[in-house]
Image (cartoon, grey):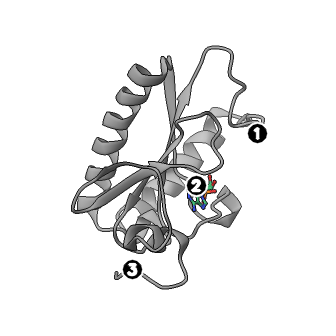
């Protein structure tokens, strides 16, 4: 998919909007998030306009993950972070604000608040859990 005119990340990739760049190669651009959870919070962005990870070609998936891992190591070294979150919000209901796939790399420190504040659910039984797994498994090959 080519880059598009009305996408903020496509504009950054084309150099029409400035960014604080960390890394770039033929497939990926990495820059700092303008409203970080922690300073140094980065976005790994494919140079191909796709709203969803599900339509992004597989070669981008591998490169994004590999790059995110390298960026996370650099964040830990540079910022003395003790860990990191890799977060990909896919779809509005999942919190996606910018409709161009991106992976957040968020440096984390021991006293940080949890990023996900959603309380966990509990299956009523193992049977219900197995049925849920079966339901999803059946769609994996389609
Ligand atoms: P998401 O909610 O997963 O779609 O995240 C989009 C992220 O993009 C947010 O964390 C924003 O702060 C960030 N963002 C939006 N515009 C810019 C920009 N011009 N430069 C850097 N980060 C941006």
Give the quarter of the figure containing the N terminus.
bottom left
User: Which residue is identified by label 2?
Assistant: 89
Q: Residues within 10 Å of mark 2 (few under 14, many from 20)?
A: some
**In the rendering, at what x and y percent does residue 92 appear?**
67, 65
In the rendered view of the protein, which quadrant contains the C terminus?
bottom left
> Which residue does the image show at 74% across and 37% down from the upper left?
121
The residue wearing badge 3 is 3
Q: Alpha-carbon distance for marks 2 and 1?
A: 14 Å
Question: Residue at label 1?
Answer: 118
Would you place residue 18 above or below residue 123 in this image?
below
The secondary structure type at the circle numbered 2 is: loop
Residue 16 vs 73, above or below: the answer is below
| Image quadrant, ligand 1 | bottom right
Which residue does the image show at 41% across and 58% down from the upper left? 45
Front-lying residue, 48 or 56: 48
Q: Decide: is 38 above or below 14.
A: above
Alpha carbon of mark 3 to alpha carbon of mark 2: how far? Answer: 20 Å
Mark 3: secondary structure: loop
The residue closer to the viewer here, 76 or 90, is: 76
Residue drawn at (50%, 72%), measured in percent from left and top? Answer: 51
Secondary structure, mark 1, is loop
Mark 1 or mark 3, which has the lower sequence index? 3
Residue 95 quadrant:
bottom right
Task: Find residue 126 and report its horizontal and vertical position in percent.
Answer: 62, 33
């Amino acid at each position: 998919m080519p880059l598009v005119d009305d996408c903020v990340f496509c504009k950054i990739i084309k150099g029409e909007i400035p960014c604080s760049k960390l890394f770039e190669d033929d497939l990926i651009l990495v820059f700092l998030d303008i409203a970080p959870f922690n300073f140094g919070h980065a976005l790994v962005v494919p140079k191909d306009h796709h709203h969803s990870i599900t339509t992004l070609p597989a070669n981008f998936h591998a490169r994004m993950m590999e790059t995110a891992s390298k960026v996370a190591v650099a964040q830990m070294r540079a910022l003395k972070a003790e860990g990191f979150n890799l977060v990909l919000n896919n779809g509005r209901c999942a919190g996606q604000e910018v409709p161009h796939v991106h992976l957040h790399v968020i440096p984390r420190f021991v006293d940080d608040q949890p990023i996900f504040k959603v309380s966990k659910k509990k299956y009523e039984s193992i049977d219900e859990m197995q049925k849920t797994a079966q339901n999803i498994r059946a769609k994996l090959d389609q």
